[in-house]
Image (cartoon, rainbow, N blue to C red):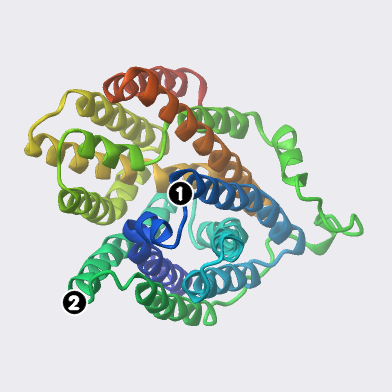
Amino acid sequence: MPPLLTRTVWLLALVSLFTDMASEMLYPIMPIYLESIGFSVLGIGLLEGIAEATAGLSKGYFGKLSDYRARKVPFVQLGYLLSALSKPLMAVWTAPLWVLGARTADRLGKGIRTGARDALLAAEATYATRARIFGFHRGMDTLGAALGPLLALLFLWVYPEHYRALFLLALFPGLVAVGFTLLLREPAPAEAPSVREKGAGRPGFFSFLKYIPQSSPAYRRLLWGLLAFALVNSSDLFLLLLLKHKGLSDSALIGFYIFYNLVYALAAFPAGSLADRWGLKPAFIAGLLLFAAVYGGMALAGAWWHFGLLFLLYGLYAAFTEGVAKAWISNLAGAEQRATAIGTYEGLRSVATLLASALAGLVWLQFGPEVLFGATAALVLGITGYFLRKVAR
C-alpha cells in the first residue's frame, strides 16, 4: 500500500507551515504598524479590502489557468515567492501607494498558488483519503499560524516597537518555504492534451465563472451552500473585538488566538480521518453545528473560562470544515478541472467573506455585538438544514 503522506504532501505541508509562520508573525502587529506609519482606520480597511479582493478574484483565474496549461508546480512556486518577497517590502518604504502595492502583491501570491496547490494535494489522494490529506495540510498550515505570533511576541519582548525589523525578519521563513517549493515535481497530466482547451487562447480573467453552469449539479448545490455559509461567516477579527468589548486584555486576545490555532492544528488530521470514515457531509455538518454553538455562546459568555471553552470548540469547527470542504469539492470535480473547481469556490468565498465582514460591522454598530453573534448562530443553523436536505454526500 502506498504511503498516505507522500513526498509531495509533506513538501506542501512544510511550505504552508513556514509561509503561515511568516504571515502570522505580522498579523497581530499589522494594524499597529500601519497606524505608526500614518494609516487611519479607514485607510487600513481600504488597504485590506483591496488586498483581499485581489486575492479572492485571482484564485479563480489562476486556478483556471493552471488547469488550462496542465501545469501546477510553476504556479505554486511563483505564488509563494511573490508572497515571501512582498512582506518585507512593506517596511522598506512607507509611502501609502508602495505599502498598498506590497500588501496587494502578498495577497496576489496567495491567489496564484491556491488552486494549483490544492489540486496537487488532491492528486496525491483517493476518494477515501482526501479529507485526511487536506486535514494534515491544514494542520501544518495552522501550526505555522500558531508559531508565528509566538515568535513575534518573543521578538517584540526583546525589541519593543521594532515593527519594521519584524517585517524584515519575516522574509526568512518565507524563503525557507520557497526553497521547499523548488523540490516539487510536476505530476503526469491527468488528461490527454486534446482534452484541454487547445487553440482557445488564454482564458479571460473571469472565465472561471463559466465552470459553474458546466459543472455537475452536485458541485453547484455544494457551492451554493458553502457560499451561503461564507456570507454569514465574518472575519475572525470580530471574535477578537468581542473579547476586547467584554474587557479582556490585549495579551489575553493574542493568547486565545494562539490557543485556537493550536487546537485547529492538532485536530485537523484526526478530523480528516473521521471525515473519511463517517463521510464528508456528516463531518462538515458537525463543524457547522460547532460554529453555531460557538457564536451563540459568545453572545452570552462572560467569564474567561467560557471563552477558553468556546475557542476550543472554534478550533474543532475549523478542523471539521476547512479541509473537509476542499476534499468534498475535489471529489466532485474531474482531475483536469480540479484547480478550476477549487479556485472558483475560493475566489467567490473571498468575495462573500468581504461582504460578510462589512455586514457584520454594520450590525455591530447598529444593534451591538450580542445581536450579531446570536443572529449569525441562527442563520448557520438554517444553512445546516440546507446541507441536510439539498447537498448529497
Using residue 101 as the reference point, say whether residue 139 is left or right of it: left
Task: Give the CA distance from mark 2 to mark 1.
Answer: 28 Å
User: What residue type is disc 2 on?
Assistant: Val
Q: Is residue 289 above or below residue 211?
A: above
Query: Which residue is labeled 1 in the image?
Result: 40
Q: Which of the two discs, 2 and 1, labels the residue nearer the N terminus? A: 1
- Helix, strand or loop for disc 2: helix
User: What residue type is disc 1 on?
Assistant: Ser
Q: Is residue 145 above or below residue 85?
A: above
Q: Nearer the viewer, mark 2 or mark 1?
A: 1
Residue 381 rendering spot, x and y as whole percentages: 36, 20
Query: Image quadrant of residue 110?
Result: bottom right
Residue at x 75%, y 36% (from the top left corner): 214
* 2 and 1 marks in contact (CB < 8 Å): no
For this rendering, which residue is in front, 8 or 12? 12
Q: Is residue 283 above or below residue 63?
A: above
Q: Residues within 10 Å of mark 2 (few under 14, many from 20)?
A: few
Residue 11 rendering spot, x and y as whole percentages: 44, 73
Residue at x 27%, y 42% (from the top left corner): 240
